Amino acid sequence: MKRIFNFSAGPAVLPEAVLQTAAAEMLDYHGSGMSVMEMSHRSKIYESILEEAKADLRRLMNIPDNYTILFLQGGGHLQFAMVPMNLMKNRVADYIVTGQWAKRAYEEAKIFGQANKIASSEDKGFSYIPNCDDLPISPDADYVHICDNNTIFGTKFHKIPNTKGKILVADMSSCILSEPVDVSKYGLIYAGAQKNIGPAGTLIVIIRNDLLTEETLPGTPTMLKYLTHSENNSMYNTPPTYGIYICGLVFKWLLNQGGLEAMQQYNIKKANILYDFLDKSRLFRGNVAKEDRSLMNVTFVTGNNELDDLFVKEAKAAGFDNLKGHRSVGGMRASIYNAMPIEGVIALVDFMKSFEAKHVG
């Protein structure tokens, strides 16, 4: 079996150990005689899978007892609507727009009330994170929303914005579990699983218990209330059972790696290998401000579109797949999530060096 180095932004690479465990348990989970895919979500054996996954995530992220973990569906895009439906009591919310997904969240919130763009980096193609030390927070805003890591553009909030006492809501889809997070600083965190946790189709919400209330916007469907899912232990309807099972395996893998502190150091080491090369390269250059660089998504270009295309093509032939940048920005993007081994980053840099030698006199 030949495994490539998969730099996809999502669905993304999973730990080989997790895939091997899932393969071994595919037909018979722990002597049950059936696959997790076939289990009733109401069964005792599946209930134990769910509870173990929640407990491991709580341990990994040191999630306080006054927060609830939900496993939902619909991806980040559904959260763009669920957040205002559940939290926009005054019909006012503030948004910091630092990329395409943050912008979509902001545009969606406009459907439900007054969404204020209080900071943005769109003026320079989302290549930096704006200063958020003294934001023009709206007095009656119900919350402030950020996209913590910008998958498409490769930027990251390395400092929590000063929300002046307002609830902070964060989309952490592409950086969750890559480093320790002080959950108590947030009212709500949501993250699609397909980038750094598990397979597509599963979403995690971590919400402070005081925000679980029936006081949602008029017309909010039962299925789109966080309280509905918390009161039913994420099983109001059939949840993404197999996806949750894989997420649980990933949580155990992370704990075995030493937890999020160890993963952060590993991720810094991986990212530095690639960024150090980009800073010295005669051909490639990074797209974003150094102080705002993401550990998960590294974007870069050659400055020549034809050369970019050639690099992506030759890289794929050499076993480095999904390096093409997002269609909205072009260039290249290497997503180096937790499961990307350091050997993959080293091999990519070696390939980039050989490509550079051929194309730079």
Image (spheres, grey):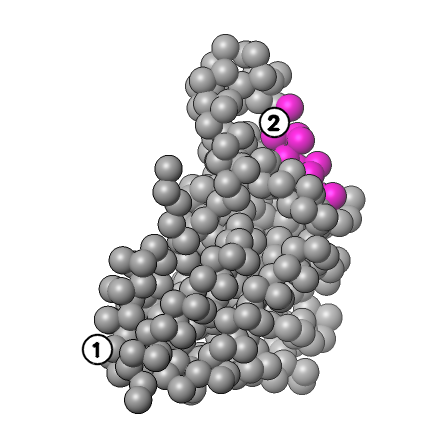
Q: Is residue 105 left or right of residue 175?
A: left
Looking at the rendered image, the disc whose residue lies closer to the viewer, 1 or 2, is 1
Residue 57 magenta-highlighted = yes
Q: Spot the residue most to the right.
A: 65
Residue 4, how many percent across, how many down? 38, 50
**Residue of label 1:** 306
Residue 68 versus residue 8: which sits nearer the camera? 8
Q: Is residue 100 visible?
A: no
Q: Is residue 132 left or right of residue 359?
A: right
Residue 163, how many percent across, how many down? 67, 73
Residue visible at 58% across and 17% down in the picture: 30
The N terminus, quarter of image: top left
Residue type, label 1: Glu
| Number of on-image labels | 2
Predominant SS of the magenta segment: helix
**Residue of label 2:** 49
Q: Quadrant of residue 122?
A: bottom left
- Pointer 2: residues within 10 angstroms few (<14), some, or many (20+)? some
Distance from disc 1 to disc 2, alpha carbons, whole Å, reads 49 Å
Vertical order, 243 against 220 (above or below): above
Q: Which residues are magenta?
A: 48-59
Residue type, label 2: Ile
Residue 96, how many percent across, how many down? 53, 74
Residue 305 versus residue 159: which sits nearer the camera? 305
